[in-house]
Amino acid sequence: MNADYLELTNLTVSFDGFVAVDRVNMSVLPGDLRFLIGPNGAGKTTLIDAVSGLVPATGSARWAGEDLVGRKVHRIARLGVGRTFQTATVFEELTVTQNLDIAAGARRGVLTLARRRTRVPEVVVKAMETIGLTDLAEVPAGTLSHGQKQWLEIGMLLVQDARLLMLDEPVAGMSAEEKDETGRLLRRIAADADLTVVVVEHDMDFMRAFATSVTVLHAGKVLAEGSVEQVQADPRVQEVYLGPGEHSKAVTEAVLGEGV
């Protein structure tokens, strides 16, 4: 089996006594498109912050046989861990090709970077094909749509040979068409490239359409885990999203979808 999988064991993050992530255990295998869902404050973004080294944590977050807890952000990135944020961080004055080339340069030596480029590196060409921006190769990134900027940022992780991609609400602010294309892109890079992909998401329609598996967080703990169907049918998940009382089926379906 591909050794590049994520294994969290008792992962915990505390801020001044407040436990944001509480002893989370979770495994995500290559090819899985894992969605993290849950109410605001559930600990979703903090969890991927901990894995990527942005916040201190205790417990264990093992990736490709290495424990990431306690490592510096740049060292974690060198192990093939990539992270995006809700707002895409691209070089807006530079072209799509230039953005990807600079990102690819993060893994090249100084002498290689100093050489004059006579052609676009193959890794950049392949990434543009994967993210669907080949026809926009020479377009400044600042002129791209919101969705296209997110795809470019994903491409910038791919050219750095990231094999664990953690995406924070990637479809927020996208059109319906862009959401569908993003879902298809994530499926391609998870299944076809055998990457490990974790998506923090509030858009339940997007989750239902594209998730391979789902982990539900609540108050920093894992509440439920499984397929979309299993999670939707879990009464604990319905209770968290709806709260006690008699809100019933119409509200449930609006949040979690039909069939719950």
Image (cartoon, grey):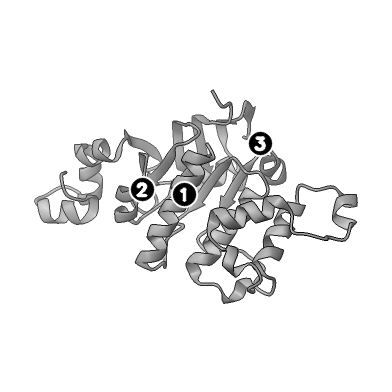
Question: Within 10 Å of the Cα at label 1, are there few (<14), some (14-19), or many (20+) other Cα atoms?
Answer: many
Left or right of residue 252: residue 163: right
For marks 3 and 1, give the CA distance: 29 Å
Badge number at residue 210:
2
Neighbour class for label 3 at 10 Å: few (<14), some, many (≥20)?
A: some
First along the sequence among labels 2 and 3: 3
> Helix, strand or loop at disc 1?
helix
Numbered label tally? 3
Horizontal side of residue 89 vs 34, given as left or right: right
Which is closer to the viewer, label 2 or label 3? Answer: 2
In the displayed structure, 106 sits above or below 235; it is: below
Query: Label 1 is placed on what type of residue?
Result: Leu
Q: Residue at x 69, y 71 (%)?
A: 94
Which is more N-terminal, label 1 or label 3?
A: 3
Mark number displayed over residue 70: 3
Q: Which residue is mark 1?
A: 186
Give the Cα distance between marks 1 and 2: 8 Å
Q: Quadrant of the C terminus?
A: top left
Comparing 231 with 194, the one in front is 194
Pick the quarter of the image with the N terminus. top right
Residues 112 and 229: in front is 112
**Secondary element at image label 2:** helix
